[in-house]
Image (cartoon, grey):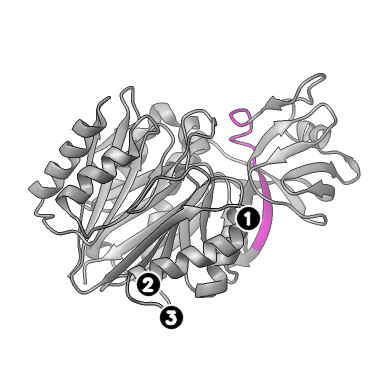
Amino acid sequence: MISIATAAAESPSTAEAVERCIDHLLAQQMASPRYLMIQLDTRHDMVAVRTAVQARWPSVHIHAATSCLGSMVQTGTHIGPEPGLCMLAIADAEGDYGTACGPLGDAPRASAAALVRQALADADRLGESPAMVWVSCAPGSEENVIAGLQDVVGTATPIVGGSAADNAIEGKWQVMAGGEPVGNGLVVSVLFPSSRLGAAFHSGYVPTAQRGRVTRCEGRRVFEIDGRPAADVYAGWTQGAVARPAAESVNVLMATALWPLGRRMNTIGGTDTFMLSHPETLAPDGSMTLFTDVAEGDEFVLMSGTTDSLLERPALVTEAACRVGEVDRSQVAGLILVFCAGCMLTVKERLDEVRTSLNAALPGVPFIAAFTFGEQGPVLACDNRHGNLMISAVVLSRD
């Protein structure tokens, strides 16, 4: 039988925060966890976290990543002013877990494939397909990372996670397993739990009538939509929410959090589903950059959201994960949530409403939330994808 517990602390002292978390987990009879997920503010010292954890549990499999402003568990939202640190521990004597971490380098696809093989070896399940792959990577190469993971585990295995984040898009994000933390890197976990799990990947946005096709782009920079400067097209679609700058490129992340660009993935029950891209900058030359890769010929649809829709979505995605995994809500042992940092910052003053709704949907269930700079998850009738302003949920059952 699987057992899950969470702990959280806010303190300027990393040593104090991690010891408080460990003590809280021990108080919940989490004496010998097999797997430990850690989400923390970049102001904390990852090496100090690892040292303290391994001193208490030398053989635990660690998956750690920085999260924007901190993290959240069922008992509280820990996003400051003092730096927050949250942990989710899994005790599962009959399950297997493995982690690996390393730099992405110049070949992120090959690096991801090598690291997931290391994680499988760490779980002593090399050559097998895990129930799920959990991933945290530096922003920028997520599509290649997913491709590399799928080269090893295939497209049917759910790959869920979120890009590591910092507090001000300064490149201070880090990831870590049992060794040294890495900046431009990837930490990957393979989960073979003894119980059932379910995963879902959604957004809280709806399509508008505005749409156009990418006619010139390079990587994550879009130069033209329907033959016109992309920044001008997007500015027109958003009715003045943003404007093409005259001199220097401008960051538009906060201004565009409720106006992402969507690409239709498939249709389920007569309803189109979309993968979202968050506009990052507008440039004087009329181009714009996104937090996802894009290809010529892609059709973008302007999406629209509200703070209410973002607040409501995590509980809905959690319920979807239960349905996908055929896990009765009364049997959920724990929840792992990926919540886009852009969405979190948009609803920051009301973030406790998300925690309240999750506690209402899954009473007494421990959960941890990561606030990320990109989200990954499985798309029905497709494979695993990377998007922005998205929400992923994973539920694990008790039996």
Label 3 near label 2: C-beta < 8 Å? no
SS assignment at label 1: strand
Please give the label number shown on residue 274. 1
Q: Residues within 10 Å of mark 3 (few under 14, many from 20)?
A: few
Q: Is residue 128 above or below residue 356?
A: below
Q: Is residue 41 visible?
A: yes
Q: Residue at x 23, y 65 (%)?
A: 331
For the residue pair 31 and 5, the one nearer the viewer reads as 31
User: Which residue has dot 2 on it?
Assistant: 121
Q: Nearer the viewer, mark 2 or mark 3?
A: 2
Q: Residue furthest top?
A: 247
Lateral position of residue 84 relative to residue 66, left or right: left
Among numbered discs 2 and 1, the one appearing first in the sequence? 2
Among numbered discs 3 and 1, the one appearing first in the sequence? 3
Label 1 near label 2: C-beta < 8 Å? no
Which quadrant holds the C terminus? bottom left
For the residue pair 130 and 4, the one nearer the viewer reads as 130
The segment highlighted magenta reads 253-265
Image spot of residue 181 (x, y percent): 40, 45
Q: Residue at x 31, y 32 (%)?
A: 84
Q: Residues within 10 Å of mark 1 (few under 14, many from 20)?
A: many
Q: Residue furthest right?
A: 227
Q: Residues within 10 Å of mark 2 (few under 14, many from 20)?
A: some
Task: Place residue 155 in its image quadrant.
Answer: bottom right
Q: Is residue 298 above or below residue 170?
A: below
Q: Give the Cα distance between marks 3 and 1.
A: 33 Å
SS assignment at label 3: loop
Q: Give the Cα distance between marks 2 and 1.
A: 35 Å
SS assignment at label 2: helix
